[in-house]
Image (tube, rainbow, N blue to C red):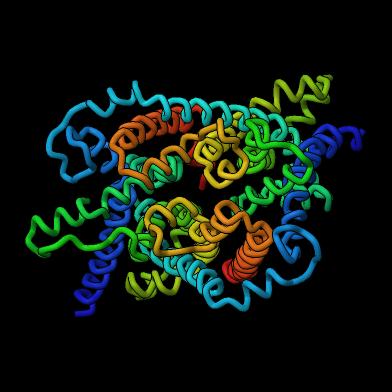
């Protein structure tokens, strides 16, 4: 009797937990699947299910010069912001990671704070700052703004890698007569490289995807991809955007798998 | 000798100087200017005072926008926790290959462009979208339901968009729980539900709090999803700030709204941080 009650208890628990988990996983996957599915439509609208299938909207992408122009701008800004984030962020991480001083703790919090502050408020205050000092918005102001919101990802991942590193290795290297620079290149850098790469990858995606900062800091000539797509979607539900989304999703999955291989991405995110 | 050896393992704090200088100029200074501008009495400049704050706090419309934004965050966080916890639980007890699949599904939305993710929800929830097409096809409804531009739609889309932020800390928290504790609980006669409620759930509290903090902060600031799924009828704080700053060019009022929003976010973050510290003390005890 008690045994049967126990079985029902175990069964109901597993069914409920697994059921909700599968529902949640379906919810997680659905949007991606739907976008790719609907991007192969032969019709003119995002009707579901599509009336027929074709590659016409992917072909259309070749002529969508506005989207291509915005894509190039977004890639350029993201590349610059990522390069600056890695350069400044890794140096800063080395400075603060192994220090217990108050300054280091304060800097650590400062460098991570863009993660929790609403990016829109930061974008607006940056615009106020640049207009007050008389600097017109340009690709340069855009890159500066993007670097501020991207650098926390590099700092967080690099500091975490440095914290896991065994200091004995550095002492061993030094006691064998290696210079600091040699030790950095041959011991420290190889050990923290996966952390830097994972951080840089997330920083790149954060910049590429950023809307709130771009809205305020871009000039009229610099169209950014997420904003272009957002405005296209507000105006008309354009199927070309679905095709471009399909391309972006495939590129993201490919990059994710590469980063998983070389940098153990998923381990760094949990 | 010992001193020189210790020196080898640390780097000079000066290495952080370039980024620190950059942050002071391009992050701290703008926020100070934002604060200063919020005390300006009118857009043309001039005197300083609390006019903008009085305007916001005395206006039921503005307070309503703030209230609905904070409330939206609560609803999204609750739904995300409800759906995300079983995902983390399933990940924990799955074989290796299934873990990989679950992790890919969880990470994918995190790294997919937010516009693309939100756009997918427009396709799903629209008048000709999947949900309406299925319901019409099954004969359950005669006319398409209005799903897009409703608060339910915004909550649903935000829950999906922010789910990774909840699931990842939960996976970390669950992986730290000693499996012997659950075994001990069942040996002592507790059923699965009771073990979950009395052992697993309390021990995963730090992960729950970390996940809720990230989800909440992201949900209330999610400008794109809020405006695309919510449409013109629903106004939340980020769009309110953008309208005042860009369309109406009322910078002092936009600055004051931003400051109020920043303070609200910081208060919530601090509350979660305190709860997090308390829960860690609890799980270590």
* Left-right relation of A214 to B141: right
Q: Is residue A26 shown above or below A6?
A: above
Q: Does residue B73 appear anywhere in the picture?
A: yes
Between A178 and B70, the residue placed more toward the observer is: B70
Residue B259: x and y, percent? 67, 63
Q: Is residue A81 shown above or below B29?
A: above
Between B93 and B130, the residue placed more toward the observer is: B130
Residue B127: x and y, percent? 22, 55
* Left-right relation of B176 to A53: right
Residue B164: x and y, percent? 44, 51
Q: Is residue B278 shown above or below B5?
A: below
Q: Where on the picture, by quarter, is residue B21?
A: top right
Between A229 and A133, the residue placed more toward the observer is: A133
Where does the C terminus of chain B fall, quadrant-wise?
bottom right
Residue A151: x and y, percent? 65, 39
User: What's the residue at 80%, 47% (across, down)?
Assistant: A104
User: What's the residue at 61%, 50% (across, down)?
Assistant: A115
Residue projecting furthest to the left: B139
User: What's the residue at 20%, 35% (across, down)?
Assistant: A41
* Left-right relation of B123 to B50: left
Where does the N terminus of chain B fall, quadrant-wise?
top right
Image label count? 0
User: What's the residue at 51%, 57% (across, down)?
Assistant: B239
Between B98 and B48, the residue placed more toward the observer is: B48
Residue projecting furthest to the front: B44
Q: Does residue A164 appear anywhere in the picture?
A: no
């Amino acid at each position: 009797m008690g045994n049967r009650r126990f079985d029902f208890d175990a069964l109901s628990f597993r069914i409920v937990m697994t059921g909700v988990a599968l529902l949640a996983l379906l919810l997680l996957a659905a949007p991606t699947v739907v976008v790719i599915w609907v991007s192969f439509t032969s019709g003119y609208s995002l009707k579901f299910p599509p009336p027929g299938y074709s590659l016409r909207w992917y072909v259309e992408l070749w002529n969508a010069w506005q989207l291509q122009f915005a894509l190039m701008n977004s890639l350029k800004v993201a590349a610059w912001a990522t390069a600056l984030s890695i350069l400044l962020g890794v140096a800063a991480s080395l400075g603060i990671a192994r220090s217990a001083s108050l300054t280091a703790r304060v800097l650590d919090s400062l460098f991570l704070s863009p993660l929790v502050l609403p990016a829109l408020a930061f974008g607006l205050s940056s615009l106020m700052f640049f207009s007050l000092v008389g600097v017109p918005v340009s690709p340069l102001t855009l890159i500066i703004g993007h670097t501020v919101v991207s650098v926390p990802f590099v700092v967080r991942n690099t500091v975490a890698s440095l914290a896991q590193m065994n200091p004995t290795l550095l002492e061993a290297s030094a006691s064998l007569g290696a210079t600091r620079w040699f030790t950095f290149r041959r011991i420290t850098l190889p050990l923290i490289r996966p952390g830097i790469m994972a951080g840089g990858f997330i920083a790149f995606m954060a910049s590429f995807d950023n809307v709130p900062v771009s809205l305020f800091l871009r000039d009229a000539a610099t169209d950014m991809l997420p904003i272009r797509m957002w405005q296209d979607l507000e105006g008309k539900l354009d199927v070309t955007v679905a095709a471009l989304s399909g391309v972006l999703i495939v590129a993201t999955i490919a990059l994710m798998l590469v980063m998983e291989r070389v940098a153990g991405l998923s381990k760094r995110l949990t | 000798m010992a001193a020189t050896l210790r020196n080898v393992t640390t780097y000079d704090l000066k290495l952080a100087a370039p980024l620190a200088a950059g942050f002071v100029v391009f992050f701290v200074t703008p926020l100070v200017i934002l604060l200063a501008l919020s005390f300006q009495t009118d857009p043309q400049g001039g005197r300083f005072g609390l006019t903008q704050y009085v305007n916001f706090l005395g206006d039921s419309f503005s307070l309503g926008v703030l209230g609905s934004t904070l409330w939206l965050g609560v609803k999204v966080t609750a739904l995300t926790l409800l759906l995300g916890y079983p995902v983390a639980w399933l990940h924990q007890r799955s074989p290796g290959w299934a873990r990989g699949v679950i992790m890919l599904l969880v990470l994918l939305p995190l790294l997919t462009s937010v516009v693309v993710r939100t756009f997918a929800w427009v396709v799903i929830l629209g008048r000709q979208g999947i949900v309406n097409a299925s319901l019409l096809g099954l004969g359950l409804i005669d006319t398409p339901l209005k799903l897009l531009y409703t608060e339910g739609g915004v909550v649903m889309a935000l829950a999906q968009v922010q789910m990774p932020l909840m699931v990842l800390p939960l996976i970390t928290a669950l992986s730290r729980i000693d499996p012997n504790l659950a075994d001990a609980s069942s040996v002592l006669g507790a059923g699965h539900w009771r073990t979950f409620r009395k052992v697993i759930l309390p021990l995963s509290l730090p992960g729950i709090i970390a996940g809720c903090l990230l989800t909440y902060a992201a949900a209330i600031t999610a400008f794109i999803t809020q405006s695309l799924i919510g449409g013109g009828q629903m106004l939340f704080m980020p769009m309110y700030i953008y309208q005042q700053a860009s369309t109406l060019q009322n910078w002092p009022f936009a600055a004051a709204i931003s400051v109020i929003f920043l303070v609200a976010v910081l208060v919530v973050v601090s509350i979660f941080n305190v709860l997090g510290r308390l829960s860690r003390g609890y799980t270590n005890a």
